[in-house]
Image (cartoon, grey):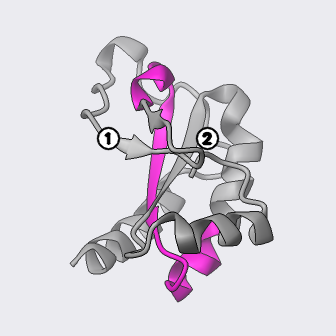
């Protein structure tokens, strides 16, 4: 279910955010707050997305076994590099059943530059 929903959302995000998009598409006082999301970071600490208040947060649900994810992760890495200073934050949330056992080696191998 998650994979089908996610794969339908990602192409929309890529189309909506062209390379020349201004950082302030929606006035700050008109932006909706991020819903409460509970994640655990690489070192076991909780990840609090409220620290990104005022940023656009691209929350990527992915998995090491997902072929589509392997194709889009480099795009998200490019977005992180290109738009981080203008208010975009990319965060990855793995859906791997065995958790960090699969994810840690994957992150080391592919050198993902955003929080996962």
Query: Could you tell me residue 24's position as x and y percent?
Result: 53, 25
Q: Which residue sits at x=56%, y=75%?
A: 102
Query: Where does the magenta region start and end?
Result: 49-73
In the displayed orientation, state which residue is furthest to the left: 1
Compute the Cα span from label 2 to label 1: 30 Å
Give the SS element for disc 1. loop
Residue 70 or residue 11, whichever sits in front = 70
**Crowdedness near tag 1: few (<14), some (14–19) or many (≥20) residues, C-alpha within 10 Å:** few
Which quadrant of the figure has residue 33?
top left
Give the SS element for disc 2. loop
Q: Is residue 79 above or below residue 33?
A: below
Answer whether labels 2 and 1 touch (C-beta < 8 Å).
no
Q: Quadrant of the N terminus?
A: bottom left
Query: Could you tell me residue 49's position as x and y percent?
Result: 42, 31
| Residue underneath mark 1 | 38
Q: Which of label 2 and label 1 is nearer to you? A: 1
Which quadrant of the figure has residue 10?
bottom left
Q: Which residue sits at x=47%, y=69%?
A: 62
Q: Which residue sits at x=73%, y=51%?
A: 113
Q: Which residue sits at x=78%, y=61%?
A: 111
In terms of sequence position, does the residue under pointer 2 or pointer 1 come before the other?
2
In the displayed orientation, state which residue is furthest to the top: 29
Q: Is residue 32 left or right of residue 113?
A: left
| Residue underneath mark 2 | 21
Which quadrant of the figure has residue 105?
bottom right
Query: Could you tell me residue 60's position as x and y percent?
Result: 46, 58
Is residue 80 found inside the magenta-colored segment of the image? no
**Crowdedness near tag 2: few (<14), some (14–19) or many (≥20) residues, C-alpha within 10 Å:** few
């Amino acid at each position: 279910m998650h994979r089908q929903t996610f794969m339908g959302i990602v192409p929309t995000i890529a189309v909506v955010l062209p390379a020349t998009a201004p950082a302030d598409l929606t006035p700050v006082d008109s932006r909706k707050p991020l819903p409460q999301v509970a994640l655990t970071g690489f070192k076991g600490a909780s990840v609090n997305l409220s620290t990104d208040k005022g940023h656009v947060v691209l929350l990527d649900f992915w998995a090491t076994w997902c072929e589509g994810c392997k194709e889009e992760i480099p795009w998200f890495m490019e977005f992180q590099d290109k738009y981080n200073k203008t208010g975009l934050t990319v965060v990855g949330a793995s859906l791997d059943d065995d958790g960090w056992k699969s994810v840690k080696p994957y992150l080391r191998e592919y050198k993902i530059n955003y929080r996962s």
